[in-house]
Amino acid sequence: MEYSYFPGCSLEATAKEYDMSTREVCRALDIDLVEIEDWNCCGATAIRTLSRATSVAMPTRSLAIAEKMDRDVVAPCNACFHKLRKSAHVLKNDKQLNETVNRILKEEEGLEFTGKNRIRHLADVFANDVEPDVLKSKVVKSLENLKVAPYYGCLIVKAPQFMEYENPERPMVMDRVLESMGADVLDFDLKTRCCGGPVVMTKEDVALKLTGDILKRAKELGADCVAVLCPMCHFNLDGKQSAVEKYLGETLDLPILYFTQLMGLALGIEPKKLGLKRNLVGVEKIVASLAKL
């Protein structure tokens, strides 16, 4: 299986462990990720600061480059996935903007966007292109007895009119993948609740409250860890967890792992190759519990 891979900016910097674990897991599952040549930032942070045509043209350029190959485009980052899908949807339904963006692409780089390639999230690929029995057969260290709270965040399902992605209130792709690898996936009622990522710099108290609600609920359900598939969500739940603890006045100590890191552990991949040392909340307990199996 081959896919055009759009890693996005976060996976080359603050979320490097997500890229590391993504590549390792795909290699173990015989999935070939072909990185889109000369891809550029999807413009997720430029939505309100640039012209509409420019903010749409930014992700469309990478999609147009990917169209040189007849493969689905795969993005692990929720923000990138959201922006790529939204731009493709907008151009499909706005003829004038489509003409403007394609004129820019053609004049500047000789590119054209037709929308022929599907844009998919990495979790969708694992859940729907890899048979559950195949996932099970690849497991070296079962996630058995590991209680996981699956947290999707809001961007992966937001605006269902263009996301066309499962039930926006109850996504299950990550649940199914982790269950196939033995995890006890909890029925997490806050799985699509916003963590406050968009306001973490401007209204930190609001973000801490939202993140705190998610972490406390996961603890109440008995989670050993939270699985995420969004760099911004990971930043809030993992990177800001100490600040959340001070805000709440209580200790949480809840490991936050990218779902690909959990998959990698189940596949027997070395923790170092999964970037687990980059996680701020220690994951030693999780690794140790799997080592005993």
Image (cartoon, rainbow, N blue to C red):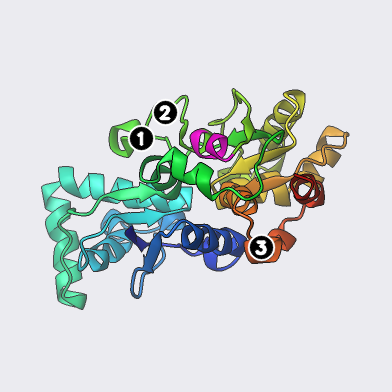
Q: Is residue 185 visible?
A: yes
Cβ–Cβ under 8 Å for marks 1 and 2 = yes
Residue 72: % across, % down: 28, 55
On the rendered image, what quadrant is the C terminus found in? top right
| Element marked by disc 3 | loop
Cβ–Cβ under 8 Å for marks 2 and 3 = no
Front residue of 181 and 176:
181
Residue shown at 76%/46% (left/top)? 286
Say above or below: 14 vs 286: below
Name the residue tied to disc 3: 275
Between circles 1 and 3, the one closer to the viewer is 3
- The Cα atoms of the two marked residues, 2 and 3, are separated by 30 Å
Name the residue tied to disc 1: 165
On screen, residue 193 versus residue 88, left or right, reads right
Amino acid at pointer 2: Pro
Name the residue tied to disc 2: 168
Front residue of 22 and 199:
22
Question: In this picture, which residue range is highlighted in magenta?
Answer: 176-181
Say above or below: 234 vs 145: below
On screen, residue 192 versus residue 218, left or right, reads left
Earlier in the chain: of badge 2 and badge 3, it is 2
Residue 212, quarter of the rendered image: top right
| Element marked by disc 1 | loop
On screen, residue 214 versus residue 12, left or right, reads right
On the rendered image, what quadrant is the N terminus found in? bottom left
Q: Residues within 10 Å of mark 3 (few under 14, many from 20)?
A: some
Residue shown at 59%/64% (left/top)? 16
| Element marked by disc 2 | loop
